[in-house]
Image (cartoon, rainbow, N blue to C red):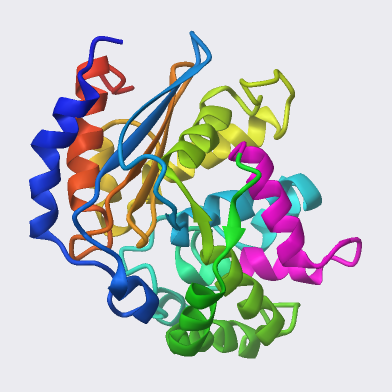
Amino acid sequence: MNLDLNNLIKENLPKQTQGKVASYIPALAEVNPNQLGVALYDLKNKEIIQAGDSDVRFAIESISKVITLLWAIKKLGMQEVFTHVGSRQTGFAFNSILNMEINKLKHPMNPFVNAGAIMTTSLIVEDKKRDPEPFAEILDFAQEICNDPDLYLDDVIYHSERRTGNLDRSLAYYMKSKNMMIAEVEPSLDTYFEQCSMMVTAKSLANLGAVLANDGIKPWDGERLISSESATYTKSLMMTTGLYNQSGTYSRLIGVPTKSGVGGGLVSAAPHEYGIGVFSPALDKEGNSVAGLALLQDIVDGLGLDIFK
């Protein structure tokens, strides 16, 4: 790899001043915005390259939706999961109820909007075969797919999410009132807030991206963790819905399946080549990392990873 990652960090870090941290979650309001880190898992050479704040722990937030979707598919099967949640773009904000209300939908439009993620989590909560508790399952799976045994739940962020998550409650109770959700609302929400409060690094996300890029096989030990079908389907959803309302724009500009989180993380999967994790907590108005997206675009362009070119 010929990219100078340290120089790209230096060039893109000042762009964080164009964004703001996710202050609507009080615990995230305390995060230092002046951070930028990246990790790349090179599938060809089976090595990780890191630069900047790549080992800083931060809240995974909406990137957890990728992990929970994969776990739900692994446990329950593709057909069961997508009986309860769709795979279309919404045209609305990620936390909006309008798309379901206006269109009289019978299920959320995709698993990466909040309603869809809560629904996916509720399927895990409702699963009668689960052992141990649902969040413990999700945490174990997250540690495995991120190759990060130190990945953990941050109780401060969890309680902050729980105290301020009234819009998510409204989504969940709306779905319950329309007989969309089988599981009880509060256990589903508690598990959802917990999954969003897991602490990862850019390196963790590079490993996650590498499993997806490697067709569901963990490149560090050669073991298949998820099916080829679920890896392919998830990458497709990341391309079309992974960056909220900017998904269409960045599918053109970056051209690599990517999912963001309001903790400042980005995970990308360049098929058969790289898993990429990026962290920078200052967000644009859509909820995506400003400096992180700029850095990711430079990396994709520099390595020629854009699948449309």
Residue 141 located within the stretch drawn in magenta: yes
The residue located at (9%, 58%) in the rendering is 17
Q: Position of residue 14 (x, y in %)?
A: 8, 47
Q: Position of residue 127 (x, y in %)?
A: 83, 65
Viewer-proximal residue among 84 and 193: 193
Identify the image quadrant of residue 303. Answer: top left
Residue 72, compared with residue 304, is above or below; it is below
The residue located at (67%, 86%) in the rendering is 186
Q: Position of residue 143 (x, y in %)?
A: 65, 46
Identify the image quadrant of residue 154. Answer: bottom right
Image side of residue 76 versus residue 247, left or right: right
Residue 132 located within the stretch drawn in magenta: yes
Q: Quadrant of the C terminus?
A: top left
Q: Is residue 42 visible?
A: no
The residue located at (49%, 17%) in the rendering is 47
Q: Position of residue 153 (x, y in %)?
A: 59, 64
Image side of residue 253 versus residue 76, left or right: left
Image side of residue 309 versus residue 103, left or right: left
Q: Which residues are magenta?
A: 119-147
Could you tell me what secondary structure mostly forms the magenta stretch?
Answer: helix
Identify the image quadrant of residue 54. Answer: top left
Viewer-proximal residue among 113 and 291: 291
Residue 218, compared with residue 172, is above or below; it is above
Q: Is residue 157 visible?
A: yes
Q: Quadrant of the N terminus?
A: top left
Viewer-proximal residue among 51 and 278: 51
The residue located at (25%, 53%) in the rendering is 289
Residue 181, compared with residue 178, is above or below; it is above
